[in-house]
Image (cartoon, rainbow, N blue to C red):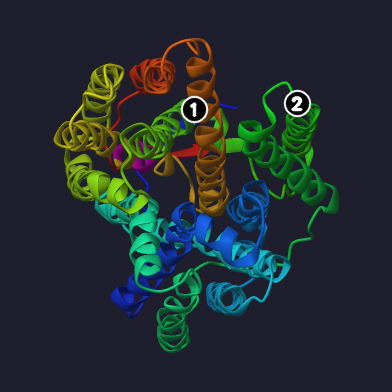
Amino acid sequence: MAATTQTIDKHVQVENRIPLIIVLMVGNFIALINETVMNVALPNIEESLGIQTTTAHWLSTGYMLTIGILIPISAYLMQRFTTRQLLLTALSFFFIGTLIAGIAPNFAVLLLGRVIQASGSGIIIPLVTTVIITITPLAKRGSMLGLLMVVILFAPAIGPVFSGLVIEQSSWRYVFISVLPVTLALLGFAAYYVRNVLETKHTKIDILSVVLAVIGFGSIVIGFSSAGAEGWTSPLVLGALLIGLAAIAYFAYRQFNLETPMLDLRPYKNKNFLMAILVTITVMMCFFAAMILLPVFMQDALGISAFDSGIVLFPGGIMIAIMALLTGRLSDRFGPKPFAITGTVLLVAMIGLMTTISTDTTILQFTLLYVGFTFAIGLILTPMTTLGLNQLTEELYSHGSASLNAFNQISGAIGPALFITLMSGGSQAVASQSADQAMTAGLQFAFTIAGAFAVAAVVFVLLVKQSKPVHHYQYE
C-alpha cells in the first residue's frame, strides 16, 4: 500500500500543557534512570543478600524483560484506557515496586519489586512519546522530541553515577528509597493536572497476539542478556533467540492480517519510518556498546573505580543532552537528513578513533573521545526520531511510538550482551599475551564491529527521502 504525502497537522489542544509535559518528562526520566542504576549497585547487593553475580544480574534483565514485554502491548492499552488512568496506574506501580525493592528482605522480594517497577515503566515510556506527538504541532515537534531525547539518552548515562554516589554514602537500598519522594510528588502532581489527551475506543484484545509478544520479545531479551554469561553457542541462548524470532515473525504476520491489530505495523510500509527505525537500532547499539565497554575497560585494565569511570564519561552525557535539544530545534527548520548524515559520518570517525584505545590512553583522552562520540549520537537520534514519528497519522501515533520504544529497549538488551561477548572473544584470541594487552585487543575488536554498525547507519540515512518538516503520511 503506497504512502501519500499531505500537509496535515493534527494535534490536540490541551489546558495546563506545561505541567502535563513536566509530569511526563520527569516520569520518563525516573523510569529510564532505573534501567542502569543496578550497574554499579550489583556488587553491594550481592554482598548484602549473599547471592551470585549471575543471580544478581536478573535485577537488570528482569526489569528490561518486563518493559520489553509491555511496550508492544502498550498501543492497545493507550486505545482502551484514558491518559489519566494509564499515567496514574503506571506511577502507582512504579511507586509500589520501588517501595518493595527498597525494603526487600531477600532477593526474591527485591526481584518482585523490580518487576512491578518495570510494569509502570513499560507503560510510562511509550505513553510519554505518544502524548508528546499528539499535543505538539508538527512545526515544533522536533524541539519537543529533542527535549524527550535528552531524557531518553541522559537518564541511562547518569544512572550509574547516581547509584555510585548513593552507595558510597549509604547502602543500595537508598538507590530505591531516595526515588520514593519524587515518585509520590509526581503522583500528586499528575492527579491534579493531568487530563485525558488520547482518544479511547472499546477494542477487543487479541489474546494470541499478547502471548506471541510476551514469548517473542521476552525470549529475545533473555537470549541476548544470557549470552554474556552462557556464551552464544549455549542451548539456552540459541533456543531463546530462535523461539523469540519465530514468535515475533508470527506476531508480525498476525498483525497484518487482523482487522484490529494489537500493534498496527502499517507504518513500516513507509520507507522513511523504516529507515528511522533501522538507524535508531544501529546507533543505539553503538551507544550502548560505548556505555558498557569503556567503563569495563577503565575499571579492569586501568584500575579505576566504577563511580570514577562514570564521572569520566559524565561530560559525554552533558554533550548528548545539549545536542539533542539543539538538533531538535534545528531539524524543525532544516529537516533531519543533513544532521543525520553529518552525525553518522562523524560516528564512524569517532568509533575509528576508539579502536586505538589502549592502556596508554589518558583519562582526558577517554573523556574527549566519549564527548566526540556523544556529539555524533546527538546529531543523529533526535532528527531521525522526529522523522520517523512525523510519518504517522493520528490513529497510528500509539502504534508507531510503541514500535520505536520497543526497538530502543531491544537495542539496550542486545548491545551490551553482543559487545561484551565480542570484547571477551577478542581477548581470548590473544590470550597468550598479558591480561592488559588481551583486554585492549578485545576492546579494539569490539569497537571495530561497532564501526560496521555505524557504517550501516550511514547507508540507512542516505536512503531517507528528505521532505519538508510539515509533511505527513497517510496509508491507503
In the figure, is residue 88 to the left or right of 256?
Answer: left
Q: Residue at x 47, y 52 (%)?
A: 39
Category of crowding for the residue at label 1, using alpha-carbon neighbours closer than 10 angstroms: few (below 14), some (14–19), many (at least 20): many
- The percent coordinates of residue 14 (x first, y second) are 37, 74
Q: Residue at x 17, y 46 (%)?
A: 326
Q: Quadrant of residue 369?
A: top left
- Residue type at tag 2: Ser
Residue 234 is tagged as 2
Residue 419 is tagged as 1
Query: Magenta segment, which residues?
Result: 383-387
In the figure, is residue 45 to the left or right of 369?
Answer: right
- The percent coordinates of residue 168 (x first, y second) are 36, 66
Q: Residue at x 67, y 37 (%)?
A: 226
- Foreground of the two, 318 or 208: 318
- The percent coordinates of residue 361 (x first, y second) are 21, 26
Category of crowding for the residue at label 2, using alpha-carbon neighbours closer than 10 angstroms: few (below 14), some (14–19), many (at least 20): some
| Residue 467 visible here | yes
Which quadrant does the C terminus fall into?
Answer: top right
In the figure, is residue 447 to the left or right of 67?
Answer: left
Secondary structure type for disc 2: loop
Is residue 450 rendered magenta in the image? no
Secondary structure type for disc 1: helix
Is the residue 353 above or below the residue 258 in the image? above
- The percent coordinates of residue 382 (x first, y second) are 31, 42
Is residue 386 rendered magenta in the image? yes
Q: Are marks 1 and 2 in contact (CB under 8 Å)?
A: no
Q: Residue at x 59, y 68 (%)?
A: 117
